[in-house]
Amino acid sequence: MEKSEFRKRAHELVDWMADYLEQKENYRVTPGIAPREILDQLPLSPPEKPESFDQIMEDFKEIIVPGMTHWQHPSFFAYFPANNSEPSILAEMLMSTLGAQCMSWITSPAATELEERVCDWLRDAKGIDSSWKGCIHDTASTATLSAILTARERVTNFQVNENGYSGKEVFRVYSSAHVHSSIDKGLKIAGIGVSNLVRIPVDHNFAMIPEELSLAIKEDIAKGFKPLCVVSALGTTSSTAVDPIKEISAICHEFGIWHHIDAAFAGTALLLPEYQGLIQGHELADSYVFNPHKWMFTNFDCTIMYLKEPRYLVNTFSMTPEYLKTDLDEEVNNYRDWGIPLGRRFRALKLWFVIRSYGLEGIREKLRNHMSLAKTAEKLILSNPDLEILAPVNFNTICFRFHSTNLQLADENRHNESWMNQVNATGKAFFSHTKLDGKFVIRWVIGQTDVSEKHIENAWSLLMSKLEEIKKESISTNG
Ligand SMILES: *Cc1c(COP(=O)(O)O)cnc(C)c1O
C-alpha cells in the first residue's frame, strides 16, 4: 500500500470507528448466527493476486461485523467485561504504527521506562505496598503461571529449572473451591499436576475459610507433601467473592509458602480508597495480579502483575544468550526476563493514555457509577418475590435466579437456564451464568464503559417479560 493511500484509508477507518462507537448499541449484542455461517462465506484458499482495500473493507462490514459479539455494547452483562475507551483505542493505533517489540530496554527504552512508571502509579493508587514492583503481561493466566513457576523455583533454589523434576517432592497448591480455571491450567503446564490443587472449603459468602487452609497445609506436611503456593481470589469469577487476604497471608508467611493474589477482575476496585481494606495484610504476600483489560477501560490485552521480590521472578525466567547481551543490563529493566515470552507489545502506552485522559478521579467516578448501577439492579431483583440473590454483591456482579418452593432443584435450574437463553436470544442484552451450591444463577455484571441507568431499566423490562413466560412454563411443569 502506498503511503498516500494509507493516509486516505486511515481517515476513512477513523470515521468508521467513530461511527461504530457512537452506534454500538444499535447492534445486537450477540449475532444470533449458527456455527459455520461465517466460515461458509470465506474462500477456501487465500488470494494469489492483491485485492482492493475497498473489497476487503466491504467484506469486513458484510461478513465480519455481523458475526461479532459486541463486547463494548452497554447491554453486554455477561462473563466479565473487556471494556475499552477512546483514549485506549487511540493509543493502540499508535502502538501498531510504532510496531515496536519491547523485549529489552535497548529495543525500546521509552516503552520500558513508561512501563515501570505506570505500574508504579497504579500500585500507589491501589494502596499496594510501595516497595513492590510491577510488570505487564498479556493475561492473568500467564501472570499466574509465572507466579507458580517462580514459587517452584524459589522453593527448589532454581533446581527444577536446572535439572528438571527429581520426583522426590510432590508440590501442593491451595485455593478456594471457586478458583478460576487458569490455576488448574497453570498447574498442568508447570508440571505440578491438577490433582495437587487442594480446594479449600468456602464459607456462606463463597470465601476461603482460613482455618481450613491451615489444616490442609498441616495435613499435607504430615503426609510428606511440599506446600508450594496459595492462590487467593480477590473477586472470584463466579460471584466476586473475596478471600480473607490478611489471614491467608499470615498462614503463608508462617509456613514459607508463596501467596499469589488473583484480583484479575475486581482488583480495579482498589482504585477506590473505600475498597483498599480488602488487601490489608498483603505485605506478607508475594504477588498480585489484576487486569486493566477487564474493568479499567484499557483494550484487551493488558494485565499487571506486582511482586514483592521481583528477583525471584527474574531469576526464574532470565535467559541472556550472547545475541541479547548489552552493557547496560545491570542498570535497566529488561522486561523479557519478567515473564514467559521473549517478545512484548508496548502495552504501557494505552495505560498511560487512559490514566492521563480520565485522571484517577475520572476512573473512580466511572467505577462508583458501576457500583451504584449494580445497587439499582440489586434493589429491583430484591423487590421481586419470585427472585433471589445467592451471593453478596461485593462490587458490580449480581448472581440471581428465579426461585419457587414448588419446584425441584433440577426443574428450577432448567427454568433459569431457559429464562437466560430466551433473554439472550433477543440480542438486546447478554447474560452468562454460573452455579452456586448446585443452583443455576444468572450473572449480571455491570462494568461497561458506556452503561447507564437506561440500559439497566431496559434489561430489567426484558428479564421481566421473559420471566412471565418462564412462570407459565413452570406452572405446567408442576401441574
Ligand atoms: C478473568 C479471570 C482470570 C483470567 O484472566 P485472563 O486475563 O483472561 O487470563 C483469572 N482469574 C480471575 C479471578 C478472573 O476473573
Image: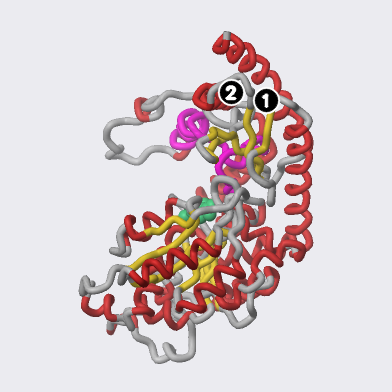
Q: Is residue 139 visible?
A: no
Q: Is residue 347 visible?
A: yes
The residue type indicated by label 2 comes to Trp
Q: Position of residue 379 (x, y in %)?
A: 78, 37
Residue at screen point 56% across, 48% down = 10
Q: Which residue is mark 2?
A: 419
* Screen quadrant of the C terminus: top right
Label number found at residue 463? 1
Residue at screen point 49% across, 36% down = 57
The residue type indicated by label 1 comes to Leu
What residue range appears in magenta?
55-83
Q: Nearer the viewer, residue 412 or 31?
A: 412
Q: Quadrant of residue 316?
A: bottom left
Q: Nearer the viewer, residue 38 or 60?
A: 38
Label number found at residue 205? none
Residue at screen point 73% across, 32% down = 381
How many numbered tags mark residues here? 2
Q: Is residue 69 magenta?
A: yes
Q: Are marks 2 and 1 in contact (CB under 8 Å)?
A: yes
